[in-house]
Image (spheres, helix red, strand yellow):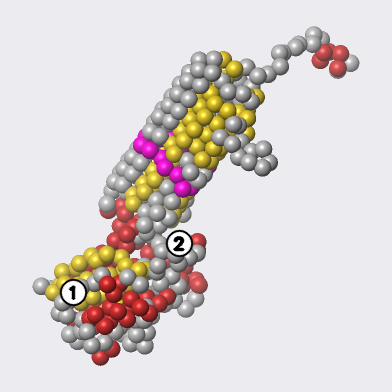
């Protein structure tokens, strides 16, 4: 049985990807493209085995592919899944009918700028498979003037372009659902191709999963959530919150309306509740940060409670400092932690305090004025 090697070329790692181009990438690890080729082979009734080759940079292709001349190598680019299925069928059929060895779907030269154009490589273009592979690897040429098929794959207008993107976005979300991801309403759901999503995870409307993110099994993400370049482990809840370049371990609860910025590491069973913002924070096992907190550059131990409205004040105008809160500590509501400082194991900080010095293990820190009540003050004021 002949083999059809599907090779997806991509640019080098240092090539810039614009945000508006990132949003077009919905297929994790380009599985969707592989599936389109397999479906096309099945519909054509051809005796080919579809082989999922690795994804290569243009510079590295020439050294990685090795196949017999009788086999077909189908080169595509990352947006090939936006091509009509008939375009892929025409490419494979044309090669099989004319006893050629290669087909290309999409221009490897314009990886991030074009939708699949369904160009063909003529038989007399190269003398051996290795010449062809070297050409692709070195210059990204795809013999642009060797076309086939009657359907135009590249849209002429922006309206047509956006219509096609939306259609295939929904097609791909259907594909994810077949593998156990639950997406009941597709409105505003955008997923990066290099994202991995575990079985049983629920994606709610207006959720965006961007960059090289990993979502575990049994999570609840959304609505209105953004996860970018982050790891979210099993059974986490991210409710209407943003997570950027952070690691979230299993069974963590975030939100609603929280902002987890770069460099955070939230350990298992911890909670960060409504309207809190974290940056550069390590939050220990089973620790809780309550509503409206602003915590930056802080190492928080296990089983710590931080009350609502607490702030870590870590910048003096020239330099940023860090706070350390040890295991089993309790920080009351409305506390200001003036870094650098350390709060000891099992220590307590009274609500409304402004803490400027270290708190020893097991101590109670109170840093506020004594209350004074002025009798009949309101009555006198209102005369």
Image quadrant where residue 50 sits: bottom left
Q: Is residue 249 magenta?
A: yes
Of all residues shown, which one is farthest toward the top? 375
Of tags 2 and 1, the one toward the viewer is: 1
Q: Closer to the camera, 90 or 99?
A: 99
Where is residue 104 shown, x and y percent of the image? 30, 78
Looking at the picture, does residue 25 appear above or below residue 255? below
Looking at the picture, does residue 37 appear above or below residue 326? below
Quadrant in the picture for the C terminus: top right
Are circles 2 and 1 on residues that touch, CB within 8 Å?
no
Where is residue 175 shown, x and y percent of the image? 30, 57
Q: Which residue lies at the image location 20% right of the left edge and 67% below the top edge?
A: 51
Name the secondary structure under disc 1. Answer: loop
Name the secondary structure under disc 2. Answer: helix
Q: Which residues are magenta?
A: 243-260
The numbered disc on residue 241 is none
Q: Which residue lies at the image location 16% right of the left edge and 72% below the top edge?
A: 3
Q: Which residue lies at the image location 62% right of the left edge and 17% below the top edge?
A: 366
Q: Is residue 95 magenta?
A: no
Q: Closer to the camera, 8 or 132?
A: 132
Where is mark 2, residue-wise? 22
Looking at the picture, does residue 228 appear above or below residue 87? above
Quadrant in the picture for the N terminus: bottom left
Of all residues shown, which one is farthest toward the right? 383
Where is residue 162 shown, x and y percent of the image? 47, 68
Q: Closer to the camera, 212 or 290?
A: 212
Where is mark 1, residue-wise? 67
Estimate how packed mark 1 is, as few (under 14), some (14 to 19) or many (20 or more) residues with alpha carbons within 10 Å.
few
Estimate how packed mark 2 is, as few (under 14), some (14 to 19) or many (20 or more) residues with alpha carbons within 10 Å.
some
Of all residues shown, which one is farthest toward the bottom? 124
């Amino acid at each position: 049985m002949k083999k059809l090697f599907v090779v997806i070329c991509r640019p080098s790692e240092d090539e810039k990807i614009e945000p508006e181009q990132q949003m077009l990438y919905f297929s994790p690890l380009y599985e969707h493209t592989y599936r389109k080729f397999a479906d096309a082979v099945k519909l054509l009734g051809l005796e080919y085995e579809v082989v999922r080759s690795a994804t290569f940079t243009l510079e590295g292709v020439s050294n990685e592919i090795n196949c017999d001349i009788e086999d077909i190598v189908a080169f595509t680019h990352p947006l090939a899944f936006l091509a009509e299925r008939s375009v892929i069928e025409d490419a494979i059929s044309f090669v099989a009918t004319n006893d050629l060895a290669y087909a290309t779907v999409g221009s490897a030269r314009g990886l991030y700028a074009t939708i699949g154009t369904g160009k063909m490589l003529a038989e007399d273009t190269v003398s051996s498979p290795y010449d062809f592979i070297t050409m692709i690897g070195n210059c990204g040429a795809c013999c642009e003037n060797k076309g086939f098929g009657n359907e135009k794959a590249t849209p002429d207008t922006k309206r047509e372009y956006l219509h096609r993107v939306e259609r295939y976005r929904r097609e791909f979300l259907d594909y994810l659902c077949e593998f156990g991801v639950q997406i009941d309403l597709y409105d505003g759901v955008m997923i990066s191709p290099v994202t991995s999503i575990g079985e049983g995870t629920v994606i709610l409307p207006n959720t965006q999963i961007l960059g090289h993110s990993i979502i575990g099994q049994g999570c609840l993400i959304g609505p209105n959530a953004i996860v970018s370049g982050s790891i979210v482990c099993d059974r986490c809840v991210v409710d209407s919150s943003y997570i950027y370049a952070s690691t979230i371990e299993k069974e963590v609860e975030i939100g609603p309306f929280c902002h987890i910025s770069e460099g955070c590491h939230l350990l298992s069973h911890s909670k960060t509740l409504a309207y809190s913002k974290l940056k550069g924070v390590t939050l220990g096992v089973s620790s809780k940060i309550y509503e409206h907190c602003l915590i930056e550059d802080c190492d928080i131990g296990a089983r710590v409670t931080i009350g609502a409205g607490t702030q870590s004040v870590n910048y003096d105008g020239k330099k940023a400092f860090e706070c350390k809160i040890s295991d089993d500590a309790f920080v009351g509501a409305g506390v200001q932690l003036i870094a650098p400082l350390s709060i000891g194991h099992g220590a307590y900080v009274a609500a409304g305090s402004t803490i400027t010095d270290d708190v020893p293990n097991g101590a109670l820190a109170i840093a506020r004025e004594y209350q004074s009540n002025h009798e009949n003050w309101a009555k006198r004021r209102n005369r």
